[in-house]
Image (tube, rainbow, N blue to C red):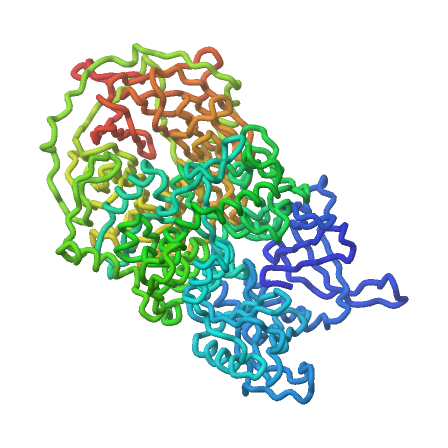
Amino acid sequence: MCTRGFFFEPQDSNLPILRFFFRDMKEMPVAEIHEHPQASDCAIFLTFKVSSVVEMKERGVDHPYVQKETSAESSGVPEKYIFSLLHSKIEEFLKNVRPIWELAHKKGVMNKVDEEALLEPVLTPRQTDQFDSSLLVDFRERPLLTKGKLVDRIVPLLKYPGCLMLTNQRLYFQPAQVNNVGDPVLNWAYNTIEYLYKRRHMLKQTGLEIFLKNGESFFFSFRNHVDRDEVYDMMVNQPDLKHLQQTDLESMLRKWQQREVSNYDYLVYLNNAAGRTKNDLTQYPVFPWVLNDYQSASIDLSDPAVYRDLSKPIGALNEERLEFYKARFEAMPRGMEDEGLPPPFLYGTHYSTPGYVLYYFVRMAPEYMLCLQNGKFDAPDRLFQSIPSTWSSCNTNHADLKELIPAFFDDSMSPEEWLCNGKNLDLGTTQKLTRVGDVELPAWASSPSTFVRINREALESEYVSEHLHEWIDLIFGCKQRGEAAIEANNLFYYLSYEGSVDLETITDPVEKCSFEAQIQEFGQTPKLLFSGAHPSRNDVGKAVAIATPDLIPSPRKLEESNGAANGSSASEVETRTREDSVLGENTSYDEIEEEDNTTGNRRSMFAFRTRSFGAVPKQAQRFVGGITAQLRRRMSAESSRRWNWAFGTNSDASWAPSAHYMLHAGEVTSLVLGKDGRALFSTSKDSTFKVSATLDGTLRRNLSCNLALSCCDVSADEKYVFVGSWDNCIYMYSMDVGRVIDQITAHDDGLSAVCVFEDRLLSSSWDGSIKMWHYTPKGIATAPLSTFMECEESVVKLAVSADGSTGAAATRNGIVYLIDLRTNELIRKPFASPVHQAEICGLTFCGGASTIACMSTANELSVYQTDGTRMVTVNVNADGPVRCFDSDGEYAVGGTSTGKLLFWKLDEPTGQEQVLEIPEAHDQGVSALTVSPHGSTIVSASADGGIRIWQLRRKTASRGRLPAFF
């Protein structure tokens, strides 16, 4: 039994391990009387019914978990399961099951904090500090502690709670009895321990790691640093541990300079001294890329040109990419930490994270990636496939800064284990139809062993020996943080640094959980070892400044000192004008009310060119036959929006421009109409979010940020607006108080879309992730309710069904992912742009939760049912690509890059389809549009920041010259 269901592991390893979720059991498991197959009388059995079963590790192979529905006749999976408990009383077992089963059936979506709080009464009694003295190896042993110390044993991706006990002969770890099966107690005689180190865990000084003489190591995290220090002090005073010596960095440095220690062994030593350990993937040992040539057929290690510049961090090797990071850094707000904003940083992702380690080790330790990825391998195109392509990605991808791990240089382990698919894992097929198997090696490496050997020779080369100290300064030394890090282009997100936050003092469980999640996901910077420049290998005898751990500055103070160094405080630092149009002109947060902007002094009022666009019908080519009347009626009945347009060139209705104003100084990226149609919410690449009156453009609210804003959405009561930015953040804006009331760093890359429904918020990013958040009037929960990571490309559009049960995400390569938001599971992923694989520019539910319409930049319009059935496909014949789109399921409207508005009716007979247009709706490309629920108003926006309001009116003699098409 676990906290979310049952596991059954058969003795026959050919059979799969079965997992039964409590959420899939509509009824509580019960005790039933059945005939026992091995006895003449009846017996009591554990019995339950489930709607689905998860199978894993069939035939002992680590493969993606298989979920089978028990209700499906073709699955052959039974619905009812009966188990005999051999060593447990079924009454006691069911007593333990009930509270956890009830927890799984609580209504609403719980976050991790809520779940842990409800589980605490069940789990806490099983985690005791009372050590069982009957477990002592020798009855003559004398315990040194009055009671055990509560700890977690840390292994990759997991932690095992228990307690530690010291005696005069041994160290004991007694696992907590959190399950109905007791785990064996571990013990280590002091004379088997070779090293003992204080460690940090989750940026807290609570860790202790022991290394045995046989090469094994064990890592424990205590509840606080006081308990850890007490155990450490007692251990080092034991007679058999008197040989343990304190780390002597200076002595090891001299050995390295005198060539007594290799570059590899010195880096292993520095990683260990800095707290890096293979037991904790958040602080796994880090090694540098040392070569930059992975294409040549042969390689000459005596040629300096084949080596990477070790004086620069990975993010600074590509000057063009570095300029992007610098521009973003300059645009970030300073001195606003008290308002919840993080200090500025160059890199939002780290060079060492759990995901990077498992990326390299997916073939050797597939079970870890399956654990991290919810039972699935990462998308084939994102897996570790090639050394050359991985190096290329680390130099060009804005979200990829990974360094290497020791395995790239370790000749003591078999490189085939992690470079070859010796387990014949089904890792999938890429978009280029290439099966993922062994890792592609550089042309100069004929085998994995050759690759590691040459890589090791490069690490030990004279060139690297002369420059390795420069990389050490970046990772372990004086350029790791502070002003020196800024000058070296080496500043990371503040939470990656030791001392940035004291988790032991945080009492709010939600805030603490958020910090832990970010530290766990984004990686940690190693402990600072050297406060001064590290001498080169040939500079023997030069003094070295060893860092004092207690004097590590908080990254939150870095910008203050940097500002002071330039003669001003951080809050007074003036932001230079950026020439890059991606960045906004205003770099401070500024909320104002009721600003008059009826004319806009930046350019004159737009003059509408009257022309009948009803006379310019465009023929459309339909690949799939028209939808049936039955389907159309169902779509219309389920839709929360019905536009009721009378489509046709002879209609007595026309679209009249009722207002036009220059609202933004840059391209408008999103538009949302208020429910009554009087308020317009908009975001722009000029870094502003605005609320204006649709009647005349009067500005009601304004928020000026520091980077381009990409999207926004409004709560149902229109009290809160959620704004997505290129700085990876979501801002929660209160309409009542006219200011930002909360802000979270939501993704590794910029936000592409946000959708608000009920008390939840769905967000997507160009990093390919989709997250669901809970919000209250006080702010957004800092930890997401769920994270969906199965998209293979950047997510560009989002939509949520009217009942909030289904989400749709569109990607840059033309795929739509339909997601069950209740379970965070993929329903299916239709290819909306199968021919061109073009980016989806518009996505909307138009039939409740059953129908979705989307448009690609290759002008492919598709309508799907959520079961994957394609209902309509139209190839739109337009002068330029469609950039924005909306539909109610019966009609559709789109804006093009040439400034046109296009209109379609989706159920016209084949061969009679028309695309009608307003040919010059805007001078520049239409970048965003929105339609009122009943279809009487359209708001369109352009790349120059202009807004145009269109009203559907009946034609009259006085309006005879107005553009009309229906």
Question: Could you say which is closer to the camera, residue 613 or residue 166?
Answer: 166
- Quadrant where the N terminus is found in the figure: bottom right
* Res. 135 image quadrant: bottom right
- Quadrant where the C terminus is found in the figure: top left
Question: Could you say which is closer to the camera, residue 745 or residue 674?
Answer: 745
Q: Is residue 185 left or right of residue 301?
A: right
Question: As displayed, is residue 92 above or below residue 626?
Answer: below
Residue at 29% over, 20% down: 898
Q: Is residue 707 left or right of residue 16?
A: left
Q: Position of residue 399 (x, y in %)?
A: 40, 43
Q: Position of residue 94 (x, y in %)?
A: 66, 68
Question: Could you say which is closer to the camera, residue 16 or residue 327?
Answer: 327
Q: Residue furthest right?
A: 40
Residue 633 can be seen in this image: yes
Q: Position of residue 73 (x, y in %)?
A: 72, 41
Residue at 45% over, 52% down: 352
Residue 67 can be seen in this image: no
Q: Position of residue 294 (x, y in %)?
A: 49, 35
Question: Could you say which is closer to the camera, residue 35 or residue 121?
Answer: 121
Q: Is residue 820 left or right of residue 132?
A: left
Residue at 51% over, 29% down: 831
Total residue callouts? 0
Residue at 28% over, 54% down: 484
Q: Residue furthest left?
A: 601
